């Protein structure tokens, strides 16, 4: 007697948008015996949304994600040095899923307060830009890329009507902004510059100001620091 097998159901909830990439790291999870977890790649994305034509209209959402899939891992690792450099801006168009909220205790100026971060999995990267220069694009889905390009073209400049978009309430880790390089100064070269296209300088950032997790930034490479002027 043949029995029909009902297909397994799974309800997806995806988040797609733009954000600044940081804190790319390999994580070794704790475990005992057979339950020992495998190491995984993780990253933080400071995603943003809102109306750029309204003062204080841009809001940031901190994401802490496990990078899922070989294609996404390769793309993230290719810009790992730049993402972990406080002087570089790595902007990504991404899709994430399997989200849940994790609370934590703040440190620094807001020590003792309870913050929250949205955890989940980074499922797909549509494109990556380092200091305004595109260094990666997923050519797999032309329709999604076209929609994403239209979204990117609608993004604001760093200042709207003379004001930097507000980040009130967005930053759960007491992060500070990184100013755009002066117009007469070249953007710093990444440590893996041989793997990236040559950048044209100067460039104008058309997106909201970068926000970083101030308590988790790795130390800058001394070789790069020597080549960067204040």
Image (cartoon, rainbow, N blue to C red):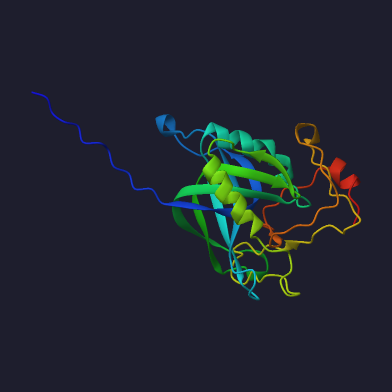
Q: Looking at the picture, how far across and down is residue 60, in whole percent?
A: 60, 63
Image height of 144 relative to 37, above or below: below
- Which of 169 and 102 lies nearest the eye of the viewer? 169
Quarter of the view holding residue 209: bottom right
Residue 184 vs residue 46, the one in the foreground: 184
Instruction: Kindly indicate the quadrant of the structure image that contains residue 126.
Output: top right
Q: Position of residue 149 (x, y in %)?
A: 62, 50
Q: Residue furthest top?
A: 1
Q: Is residue 49 left or right of residue 214?
A: left
The quarter of the rendered structure image containing the C terminus is bottom right
Image position of 96 (left or right of 204)? left
Picture coordinates of residue 106 (x, y %)? Answer: 59, 64
Where 102 falls versus 72 (above or below)? below
Q: Residue at x 63, y 41 (%)?
A: 25
Q: Nearer the viewer, residue 26 or 161?
A: 161
Q: Tell me residue 13's x, y (percent).
A: 41, 51
Q: Identify the residue shown where x is 78% and y is 36%.
A: 197
Q: Residue furthest left?
A: 1
């Amino acid at each position: 007697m043949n029995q029909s097998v009902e297909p397994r159901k799974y309800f997806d909830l995806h988040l797609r948008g733009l954000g600044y990439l940081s804190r790319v790291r390999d994580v070794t999870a704790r475990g005992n015996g057979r339950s020992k977890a495998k190491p995984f790649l993780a990253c933080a994305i400071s995603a943003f949304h809102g109306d750029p034509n309204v003062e204080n209209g841009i809001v940031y959402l901190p994401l802490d994600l496990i990078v899922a899939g070989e294609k996404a891992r390769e793309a993230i690792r290719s810009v790992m040095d730049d993402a972990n450099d406080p002087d570089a801006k790595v902007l990504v168009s991404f899709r994430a899923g399997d989200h849940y909220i994790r609370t934590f205790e703040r440190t620094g100026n807001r020590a003792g307060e309870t913050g929250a971060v949205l955890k989940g999995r980074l499922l797909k990267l549509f494109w990556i830009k380092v200091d305004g220069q595109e260094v990666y694009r997923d050519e797999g889905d032309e329709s999604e890329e076209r929609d994403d390009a239209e979204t990117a073209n609608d993004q604001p400049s760093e200042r709207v009507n003379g004001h930097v978009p507000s980040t009130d309430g967005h930053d759960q880790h007491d992060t500070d902004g990184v100013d755009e390089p002066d117009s007469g100064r070249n953007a710093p070269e990444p440590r893996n510059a041989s793997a990236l296209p040559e950048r044209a300088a100067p460039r104008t950032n058309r997106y909201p100001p970068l926000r970083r997790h101030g308590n988790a930034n790795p130390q800058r490479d001394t070789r790069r620091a020597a080549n960067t002027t204040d």
